[in-house]
Image: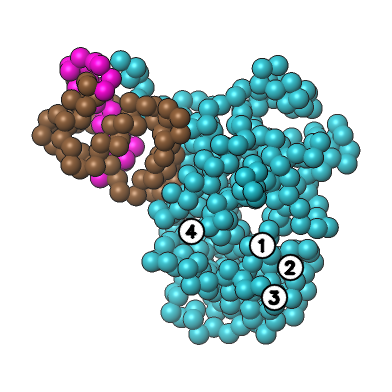
Chain colours: A cyan, B brown
Amino acid sequence: MDFNGPTEIRASEGMGPQIKSQTVSVPRPGDLAPRWDELESAAAPGVHEVDLDIAGIRVRLQGLGAEQTDWIGGRYGVFAGPAGGATPGLTVSVREAPFEGFLQLDRSGPAEVYRLVQEVDGDRVRAWSYRFAGWFNEPAGTGRVWFSDRDGKGFESSLENFLRVVYSSLALRRRGFFLHSAGVIRNGRAYLFYGPSGSGKTTVCRLSLEEEPGTRIVSDDLILVLPGEGGEGPRAVSSPFRGLYAELPARQESFGIAGFYRLVQDTEVFLERVSRPRGVGELVGSLPFVTDRVENGERILDAVGGALQAVPAFRLHFRVDPTFWGALERGADG
Amino acid sequence: MTASEEAGGREWGPEERPKRVSEAAFRRYDERTVVVLPRGAEINVLNEIAARIFELLDGANTVAEIVDAVCQEYQVEPETARQDVQSFLGELESHRMLA
């Protein structure tokens, strides 16, 4: 009976027990849980409104200060605009937090991995980190977020991280997902390289740019994957969550996906095709913010399984040089 | 030591009715099944027989009934099936995939 190793369970490159998504933390001693009732009475920094629109997924921010609004316009560029037009999927009220912070940053040792806590209460998803706390209710289309910093880097990084949580959830409603990955465009198609932190996503972007200056990088951090229209395969969609090497795009655009490539640093360079279920398992392990919430399980399997119905998944074994592009062009049989 | 104990679990009685955790989402793709466990954000990939057993772990089927199903559907000897089901249950327990 073919029962040897009934749970074909794998992690990174060893035969570890499972794939683990590392995007969510649990509180540690010293962290402060948001006192939601007290937060409710906090004031808004201003009266301005901005609409964010990523591939038609719209979020309205209300109660912003003038400087916050200016910064959002610059940071999010084509993805931000004045409120109005189509009804947003989520309207979020911005408030000033009457507390100095929530999670406590450990400065005693090496820089700690970013921490974020989420909890679900009915339809309400709560998320908080060092300098912000917020909630959103997708079915009701409402949300609220409190920032400890009115402006500056504290506000900017907090807003960005809150939006990443929100958009990761909203994408699932569209049968899409944000993948922790780097997206490089060659011949009009997107090659999506993924893997845990340190696997080489940023390196792949740098090598691609060195080999072919002007190469378009969609992102080296988060890529939005959405189903294509009219039966087309999934597409990699530009978003403002772009990392180090990608520039803010001048317009919203999307690209057909050549393949999903899990990065494996190796002494040899070759492409290894992986089966759809294994690919689903590996991709799901690189979805930030959503995998620990019970209500998302079916949507995740729908979205990722759907994407891999049309686009193949591979492991790309590579060295730190651009020869991997040769392997990609030759394909898994080359 | 039994197969289940080797896998880190206890020996399951034939009349017990093991049940997978309710929050597990699972989907079959081709001959494999992907299981997403929200608690701890774990993702597991099961082969065909393991997936079939996982489906049967609904709290209604006894261990004996599951062993019978494996024997009939995969043409294996009862003792082999019994040991493998025990081993698999132990593995699921160690991954907190049973209620």
- Quadrant of residue B92 in the image? top left
Q: Nearer the viewer, residue A62 or A255?
A: A255
Q: Are marks 4 and 2 on the same chain?
A: yes
Q: Is residue A319 above or below residue A23?
A: above
Q: Position of residue A209 (x, y in %)?
A: 84, 37
Majority SS type along the magenta span: helix
Q: Chain of mark 1?
A: A
Give residue A220's position: percent from left, percent from top: 71, 45
Does residue A4 appear to the left or right of A16 in the view shown?
left
Q: Are marks 3 and 1 in contact (CB under 8 Å)?
A: no
Q: Magenta part of the protein: which range?
A: B73-99
Tell which subunit mark 2 falls on.
A
- Residue shown at 53% from the left, 71% from the top: A141
| Residue B83 is inside the magenta segment | yes
Label drawn at residue A117: 4
Label 4 vs label 3: CA separation?
A: 33 Å
Earlier in the chain: of badge 2 and badge 1, it is 1
- Counting from the top left corner in percent of width and height, residue A49 is at 68, 78
Tell whether label 2 touches label 4 (CB within 8 Å): no
The question of residue A78 being in magenta is answered with no
Looking at this view, is A175 or A116 the one in front? Answer: A175
Res. A120 visible in picture = yes
Q: Which mark is residue A56?
A: 1
Amino acid type of the residue that numbered disc 3 sits on in the rendered structure: Gly
Q: Amino acid at mark 1?
A: Gly
